[in-house]
Every structure is written in C-alpha cells, then in structure tokens.
Amino acid sequence: METVKMGFIGAGFIAKFHAIALQQMRGVDLVGVHALQGATELAAFAQDSGLGDCTIYPTVAELCKHCDVVAVLAPNFVRIEIVEQIVEAVKEGAELKGLICEKPLGRTVAEAKRLVALAKEAKLHTAYFENQIHMKAIKDALAQLAPQQKAMGPIALARSAEEHSGPHMGWFWDPTKQGGGVLSDMGCHSIAVSWYALTPIGKPVTFLEPVSISAETSLLKWGQPKYRQQLLDRMGVDYGKVPADDFCTGIVTYRNPESGQLVKGQFTNSWMYDKQGLRLLMDGLGPGYAFEVNSLKSPLEVFIGDEAADAAADAETALEKATASRGLLTVQPNEADLYGYVDEQADARDAFLAGKDALLNWEYGLEITKLCQAGYLSAERGQTIDLTDPAVQKELDGYTSLIAQGRGAEVLFK
C-alpha cells in the first residue's frame, strides 16, 4: 500500500484524538506538525507510537513542503488564515494530494464559502471531518437494515444527540471566537448524522433536500451566577457579558426529490450533561424497523471507591469529558474507533490516493454550516426557516448570529 505523508496544523485535543486513530490503520505516516502550543508533545507521541518521524515545522509553508496531505485541526477563528497560507504554499510548489478540515468548516456561511473557494483555487481534493457519520455502529446499522429499507421504505425519522459537560479550552466557550455555542460546536455533528441516516441506501450524502429548520437555543446551566463564576475562573470567559447557548434542539425537514416524501431529522445538544461523560445517542425509525446507538453502553465497567479515588483521581482516562473519578464508571476502551475517527481517516487516505474527494468534502461542510446558521436564525426569530426560499439563502450568505457577535444576552436572557 502506498503511504500518505500527513501533516497536522494544530496540536490540541482533537489532534491527539486523530493521532490515536492513525495508530490503528495502515498507509499514513504523521510526518510533521505546526502549532503554537502542544507541538512538542504531539511529535513525541507520534514518534513513540511508530506513526512516523514527526518533525515540528515553524511555518505552514515549511510543513506543506514535506507532506502529501495537510489536516487543519487549529481553532475555528484561524482557519481562513491557515488555508490561505496553504494555498500560497501550493502556488510556490508544495505538492499536496489533499486537504482536511475538522468540523465546523466555517463559523459563518461566508467563511465556509471562502474555504471552499480557496481549495478550488489550489485545485486540492478535500475531506471535511465529521466523525460521527463514519461510526461503525451507524454504518453497520444502515447496512443491516438495507433489505428492510428496500422492502418497506426509507427511514422517516432520525434523532441524534451529543452531550457532555463542556469544552476543554477557553476559545470554545467564547462565541466570538468559536462562532456560537453548542449549536455551532456540536449541532453540526447531530444535524449531519441525522441527515446521513435518513438518506436512502445508495444515494449521495446530499440527496435529500433540506426544506425547513426550526430550532431553539438556551442557556440553562452556565448562565447561572454560580456557574458563570466557575466558567470565568476556569476559562476566562464571562457569560454575564458574552453568553453562548449551552443547550439547543431542533428539527430539520428534508424532501426526497424522487418520491416527494418528507422526513425529519431531530437534533439535541448540550454542554450541561453532568453524567458519565460524553454521550452520543442516535436512533432511526422506519416503517417496521429501527436502530439505536448509545455510546455509553460499554462492555467494560470499572468501580473506584472513595479512598482509591482520593489517592489517584483522573477522570478522563475512562471517557472523554468524564466528570467523575469514583463510583461505577463507564469505560470505552477505544473511543477513537467508536466515534468514527479511524474510519474517517481511512476514507480520506483512500480518496486522496485515488485522486478524488473524500465521502464528505468541503462543499458538504458548507451545507452543514448553512443548516447550523439557519438554526441560529430560527432561534433568534422564534420561527421556522424556509430553506427553499432564495431570499433566505441570500440572507444566510451575510449572516452572523447574535450569539457569535457577542450579543447573546439579547436572545438568551430574555
């Protein structure tokens, strides 16, 4: 198998997850990293794990000279600047096969469109990293139910939730840097995986046409004085001044262009899920059949008593975003594979080696950005948004949510 030389831009939490995923597959070497923080630790992990001789490069341009594929894993607010530098490196001779961007593609529709245009300008194949669509549990459920879909008709209702107690880094909590709150950060996952589950077997990922969206955003925990102070102390973000949504829910309606059937994708996301840790909960309902996925159902449980917990407390060794280090703990032995990171890396590797886009390209990422931003628009107006209206599409092109502008108090405290 031909080996892809991959470079990371960014060395934070998500970069470490992707490095763990790369350990579990063949055909990719992690040869370089460029990051303002964490590069030394990531390079050491890569080398110790046999992922390749990972070199720390001082600039984006230098990294691009030594890679086949670059993965943009840096914070949302620097994405355009980074991709502009990548495009310039390509113009100066860097021979890249492909370009990866971690979700969300853009904080606004305008940003996402700019990134799509940059990739086209450099004639680069792209992969939009939305890991949940690549979860083995999702793919296996749909494959198992393919005969039922053919005989009975496609899934008509898909529901998806991603919930945990909140992000790791301060910039995630800052809506002016991240692009919003939990709807921007995690709603993109749930909207995408529901759209995918509703799509009839064998059809393209954008086959179903979005018709409308109705959404609500709320600040249920982190707007309370006690927790606002905790957030300010831990992350340096004041939700009394620049609040973001810590809970969102909504429904997207899609139309099957061949049959005219309308189907529904429901999403629910929160940064206030104070149970075992990260939970992904998905289900799909068709006529006479169904599936359900719950990431907190694990074959492994661990019990830690109070004395032992006091001696060595390390919550997140059990589960991402875990908040407890004692009691009966759910443990997932291989989160990187469970959540789809391994399979999305393999999909990108195979696509780029074949000279094409991944299953999910940046144009797809743009469509997810549109749906998330339409969700914010719906929440601000308190009404269902008609996604088929050309005037709405034009409005979304220039739209920045009040929450992303730092004016979240106007919609969250009323």
Image (cartoon, rainbow, N blue to C red):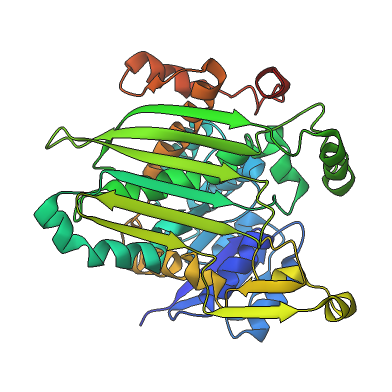
Residue 128 vs 70, above or below: the answer is above
Residue at position x 76%, y 28% from top?
242
Q: Where residue 313 sits in the image (x, y, percent)?
A: 83, 73
Residue at position x 60%, y 67% from top?
17
Residue 121 vs 215, above or below: the answer is below
Residue extending furthest toward the left: 151
Query: In this orientation, does residue 283 appear?
Result: yes
Q: Where residue 46 sits in the image (x, y, percent)?
A: 64, 78
Q: For the C terminus, which image quadrant?
A: top right
Left or right, residue 362 beside residue 270? left
Residue 287 vs 106, above or below: the answer is below
Task: State the residue in front, 11 or 261.
Answer: 261
Locate residue 252: give its quadrant: top left
Residue at position x 37%, y 40% from top?
265
Total labels drawn: 0
Query: In this orientation, does residue 126 appear?
Result: no
Residue extending furthest toward the top: 391
Left or right, residue 305 beside residue 33? right
Task: State the residue in front, 71 or 190.
Answer: 190
Q: For the N terminus, which image quadrant?
A: bottom left
Q: Where residue 36 sits in the image (x, y, percent)?
A: 75, 56
Locate residue 132: give its quadrant: bottom left
Residue 263 vs 205, above or below: the answer is above
Q: Where residue 75 sits in the image (x, y, percent)?
A: 66, 48
Residue at position x 60%, y 63% from top?
8
Task: State the residue in front, 305 or 179.
Answer: 305
